[in-house]
Amino acid sequence: MKNRLFLKRLSILLVCMLFAGSMLTLAGCKDKTTEAVTSEASEVKELGSGATSFNFNVVDADGNTTAFVIKTDATTVGEALLAVNLIEGDESDFGLYVKKVNGITADYDVDQTYWAFYIDGEYAMTGVDSTEVVAGSTYEFKVEK
């Protein structure tokens, strides 16, 4: 009987320890993109002019984030970013292949890096030149390999 009570208490203790460990692990996970933009909020650059504005972040290969607020009357994100000279690339049958963002080049043919396009933190399912501007949204280009 004593042995059963001991095993029951031991299993409850182990479950509590596993739960506490899980919570500590989850507490250590946070969105580094949001942290970077928040910590550099005083350095947000405003570009363009127009009735609609959106947030735009550039994350380089070292993880450094440059934040912008883009004001535009353009209908697509690509059109707005081209108008303020933040992106450059090559036109193809699939749309604009962005090779340069904020003066930083990422070219898969050269070093297997590319500019990944994100919308509100999610990998975009549309190209920058076919993504419609939504006021208040956050668009982002990150160098990825």
Image (tube, grey):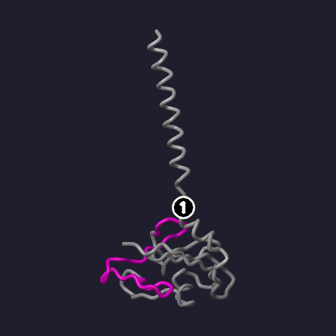
- In which image quadrant can residue 40 be found? bottom right
- In which image quadrant can residue 67 be found? bottom right
Q: Residue at x 67, y 86 (%)?
A: 50
Q: Is residue 114 left or right of residue 109?
A: right
Q: Position of residue 137 (x, y in %)?
A: 60, 71
Residue 98 falls inside the magenta stretch: yes
Query: Mark 1: which secondary structure?
Result: loop
Q: Which of the pair 5/92 is nearer the observer? A: 5
Q: Position of residue 72 (x, y in %)?
A: 63, 84
Task: Residue under label 1, please give it.
Answer: 31
Q: Position of residue 101 (x, y in %)?
A: 48, 84
Q: Residue at x 50, y 42 (%)?
A: 21
| Residue density around tag 1, few if under 14, some if 14–19, many if 20 or more, within 10 Å | few
The C terminus lies in which quarter of the figure?
Answer: bottom left
Q: Position of residue 138 (x, y in %)?
A: 58, 71
Q: Which residues are magenta?
A: 96-124
Q: Is residue 61 left or right of residue 31?
A: left
Tell me: residue 5, above or below residue 82. Answer: above
Most extreme residue toward the right is 51
Q: Residue at x 52, y 38 (%)?
A: 19
